[in-house]
Amino acid sequence: QPPTGATPGTDAGAGGTAGPAAPSAANAPEIGTDIKVRVVGQMTGGNYKVEAVSPATDRPLLLAVRHGSTPPATGTELNAWVLRHTSNVTFVTTDERGRRPISPTMAERYVDALGVVQELADDNVPDDARARLSELKGMANRCLRLDQHDWLDVWRVLGSPDRDRLALLRDLAANTNRTL
């Protein structure tokens, strides 16, 4: 398991794990999916208990609200999206942070970062291998932490891996970088 982390925009950990996870319930909505929710009440740590309006799900839902944002009133219906899953709850958010597209500049850097793995596997150590491995580690970290504007697209580019595989990628990139 990756390290415990805080849900983006909150001061407290929410659910005890960071990063996207595979849902444990059969009808859990996919990460990144739009979902309309109704606020039921406030929980600890800046989260709010919500219920799905559309599409329906049996999963317990919590709305993660960024620190400093206006808290939603009970009964309010909100257009949200699925942020992440833990073993027993799905977190949703109305914050668009994470759903922004990868910029052209970052897309080039990500392609280079992904390409270094093949080059190293082919016994070729490019001059910029360490920088590219650092970028690859950063790609995994942004998905584990859910803390960058484009983490959702990056997660999809990486093949939508679970937390364990993201942590393995992060550690592989870091250890390979140290070895070089």
Image (cartoon, helix red, strand yellow):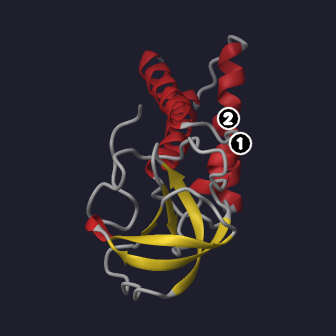
Residue 114's label in the rendered image is 2
Kind of residue sitting beneath label 2: Leu
Q: What residue sits 42% from the left and 46% below the top? A: 18
Residue 84 is left or right of residue 104, and the answer is: left
Mark 1 residue crowding within 10 angstroms, few (<14) / some (14–19) / many (20+): some
Q: Do tag 1 and tag 2 residues touch (Cβ < 8 Å)?
A: yes
Q: Quadrant of residue 25?
A: top right
Q: Is residue 44 left or right of residue 81?
A: left
Q: CA distance from mark 1 to mark 2?
A: 5 Å
What residue is at 40 percent from the left and 62 percent from the top?
8
* Image quarter in which the N terminus is found: top left
Nearer to us in this view, 102 or 123: 102
Q: Secondary structure at mark 2?
A: helix
User: What residue does disc 1 label?
Assistant: 111
Residue 177 rendering spot, x and y as whole percentages: 47, 24
Amino acid type at mark 1? Val
